[in-house]
């Protein structure tokens, strides 16, 4: 870990109190409403096109970063889908902090009011509200206050809007490969502003069994791939118990396994020669794909040893999101914990984020901490509480001051 040479600023200094209190709820809410109104649904397997790509949302973000005096740039990850960046330059004597978030949202099938953006009961409603345009709006507000107050920074502050988090994460992978890099980062995914230095990964794959097709009137002459798959499912019956007996990760707990999708057979009058089962494995920091596949093979090979007609295959991953795990001693984690406590009066302890994020792809330590709850993300009633956005902007601002402000 790099030496940041920083001390936490005195929160009770008048200077700092004024800055924190200048976070403007109306401005934040209005910015968020504008962002939600820009459709940026992930195109998934389809072609990127207006409404189903991040480009227009990225242009909005670029324009606002530019208005805040940031040096802005963009880089296409694939045609029509650029990551966008804004930088406030420091004096070159400090480390670099990046605040990043994804520009895309999940789709809106069955969500009729997805873009009837509204504020009611202290909440902002609409697709992308908590996942995660609120985080992006809070970053802009924090930068605006830094700029308006003429705060001098030692290290650079980078804002970053990333494409494709909701599908293959090509945006964050591109940043991991080609930069820009920072010393530390925050990803404002909806964690209700709990501080999440770790999360499990997701490794999904297909297990396939092969048989021999014959007419169903003579099943004894064939090999039934579905019956073989039943033995596969059986072979994993005690797997979660085995995973639970291993040492837990301090924040993530135990790994998990779940069979999710099964397909096999074409006709009821034929013995099926093919069956596939898509299985989901939540991995712990430190576990590798190779280890997990070895665990699968050990169980499946036991069946094959007893039955020479049992043939199987494990495919390449259908989902492969690595786990994240950074030290709670990282300055960005410590600063968030401390400022959360100061601003809310509630003692905050680090927890694991429940889902996968861009964090492990970025190439430097990133902590997940953002406004809103994962309980509303991806639902047909997405919202974020206004209080959460305001608190987020205050926390991000406090971290910027802690880690980047030139000491006076
Ligand atoms: Zn998200």
Image: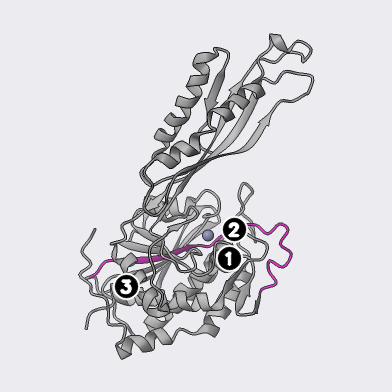
- Which residue is under mark 2? 53
**Nearer-the-camera pick, 59 or 407:** 407
Residue range in magenta is 94-117
Residue 403: percent from left, percent from top: 29, 72
**Nearer-the-camera pick, 252 or 108:** 252
Residue 146: percent from left, percent from top: 37, 81
* Side (left or right) of 42 relative to 330: right
Residue 149 in view: no
- Checking the image for residue 89, the label placed there is 3
Residue 245: percent from left, percent from top: 41, 40
- Alpha-carbon span between mark 3 and mark 1: 26 Å
- Which residue is under mark 1? 56
* Side (left or right) of 350 relative to 84: left
The residue tagged with tag 1: helix, strand or loop?
helix
- Kindly identify the residue that appears in the image at 47 percent across and 74 percent down: 138
Which of the image's four quarters has the C terminus? Answer: bottom left
| Crowding at mark 3 (Cα within 10 Å: few <14, some 14-19, many 20+) | some
Dominant SS type (magenta)? loop
| Crowding at mark 1 (Cα within 10 Å: few <14, some 14-19, many 20+) | many
- Alpha-carbon span between mark 2 and mark 1: 8 Å
* Side (left or right) of 45 relative to 322: right
Q: Are marks 3 and 2 in contact (CB under 8 Å)?
A: no
Residue 398: percent from left, percent from top: 36, 77
**Nearer-the-camera pick, 308 or 270:** 308
The residue tagged with tag 2: helix, strand or loop?
loop
- Checking the image for residue 136, the label placed there is none
Q: Is residue 44 magenta?
A: no
The residue tagged with tag 3: helix, strand or loop?
loop
Q: Is residue 104 magenta?
A: yes
């Amino acid at each position: 870990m790099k030496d940041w040479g920083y001390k936490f600023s005195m929160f009770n200094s008048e200077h700092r109190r004024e800055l924190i209190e200048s976070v403007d709820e109306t401005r934040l809410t209005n910015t968020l409403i504008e962002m939600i109104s820009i459709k940026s649904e992930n195109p998934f397997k389809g072609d990127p096109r207006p409404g189903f790509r991040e480009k227009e949302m990225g242009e909005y973000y670029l324009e606002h970063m530019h208005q805040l005096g940031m040096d802005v740039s963009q880089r296409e990850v694939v045609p029509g889908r650029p990551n966008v960046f804004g930088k406030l330059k420091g004096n070159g004597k400090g480390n670099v902090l990046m605040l990043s978030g994804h520009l895309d949202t999940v789709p809106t099938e069955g969500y009729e009011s997805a873009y009837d953006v509204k504020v009611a009961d202290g909440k902002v409603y609409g697709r992308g509200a908590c996942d995660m345009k609120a985080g992006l709006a809070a970053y802009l507000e924090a930068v605006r206050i830094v700029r308006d107050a003429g705060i001098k920074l030692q290290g650079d502050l980078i804002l970053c809007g990333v494409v494709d988090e909701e599908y293959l994460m090509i945006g964050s992978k591109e940043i991991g490969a080609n930069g820009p890099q920072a010393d530390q980062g925050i990803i404002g995914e909806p964690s209700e502003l709990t501080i999440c230095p770790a999360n499990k990964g997701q490794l999904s794959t297909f297990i396939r069994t092969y048989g021999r097709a014959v007419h169903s009137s003579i099943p004894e002459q064939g090999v039934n791939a579905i019956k073989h798959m039943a033995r596969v499912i059986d072979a994993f019956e005690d797997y979660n118990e085995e995973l639970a007996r291993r040492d837990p990760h301090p924040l993530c707990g135990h790994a998990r396994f779940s069979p999710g999708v099964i397909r096999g057979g074409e006709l009821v009058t034929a013995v099926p020669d093919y069956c596939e089962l898509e299985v989901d494995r939540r991995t712990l920091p430190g576990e590798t794909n190779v280890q997990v596949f070895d665990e699968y093979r050990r169980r499946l090979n036991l069946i094959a040893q007893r039955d020479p007609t049992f043939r199987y295959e494990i495919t390449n991953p259908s989902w492969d999101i690595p786990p994240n795990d950074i030290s709670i001693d990282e300055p960005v984690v410590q600063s968030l914990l401390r400022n959360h406590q100061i601003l809310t009066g509630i003692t905050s302890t680090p927890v694991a984020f429940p889902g996968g994020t861009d964090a492990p792809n970025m190439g430097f330590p990133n902590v997940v901490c953002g406004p809103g709850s994962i309980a509303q993300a991806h639902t047909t009633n997405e919202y974020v509480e206004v209080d959460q956005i305001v608190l987020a902007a205050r926390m991000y601002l406090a971290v910027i001051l802690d880690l980047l402000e030139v000491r006076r």
